[in-house]
Amino acid sequence: MARRKNTFWNRNKFKLSGLILILPFYFLYEQLQPPEFPNVWEEKSVGPFEVAIQPLNNEAPYAHHEDWVKDFSAYVNEGNVSDIRQGYVNIGEEPVPLDTLESDDVGILHGSELLQHVHAIAPQNYKPEHRVWVTLQTWDGSVHKASWKIPENWLK
């Protein structure tokens, strides 16, 4: 019968096996913890709608299909979401014109009656004069816009 050598590896390899069995439970626990979202920004009138937006985090924009975007949730608190033909969100000095927005699929509000989500068109770096713009078009063709100031902690 062959004898095993009393090496470090032979003495401790079962501990590595136990660690490999335990690690998935740690990662599962980490994923089940709810993330902390920033506060919802003040509600503003966008035509006949009352809209409040909430950034999903306070981090910088990220690259998404050759565009820079920032994720937001939008709450339509007054008015019906079904009355909105199309809605867009962008970050900049002024709102992007509708003809430009319609040519791409970035910045479109999408979701349900309770919560709308958007990958807002954003510059790679923020400037103090930038604002978050919401542009809504209703079925009768009227366009409504509102804007929010960018928080100070985003300007770095």
Image (spheres, rainbow, N blue to C red):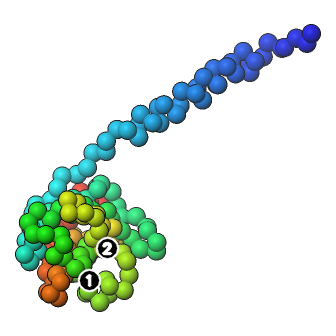
C-beta proximity under 8 Å, tags 2 and 1: yes
Of the image marks 2 and 1, the number of the one nearer the N terminus: 1
Number of numbered tags placed on the structure image: 2
Point 83% across, 14% down: residue: 5
User: How far apart are the alpha carbons under marks 2 and 1?
Assistant: 10 Å
The answer to which quarter of the image holds residue 86 is: bottom left
The reply, left or right, for residue 144 in relation to residue 17 is left
Q: Nearer the viewer, residue 26 or 150?
A: 26
- Label 1 belongs to which residue? 96
The percent position of residue 117, horizontal first and vertical second, equals 28, 63
In the rendered image, the vertical position of residue 109 relative to residue 26, given as above or below:
below
Any part of residue 129 in sight: no
Three-letter code for the amino acid on which mark 1 is drawn: Val
Classify mark 2: helix, strand or loop: loop
The percent position of residue 121, horizontal first and vertical second, equals 32, 73
- Label 2 belongs to which residue? 107
The percent position of residue 45, horizontal first and vertical second, equals 7, 71
The reply, left or right, for residue 78 in relation to residue 1 is left
Q: Quadrant of the N terminus?
A: top right
The percent position of residue 15, horizontal first and vertical second, equals 63, 20
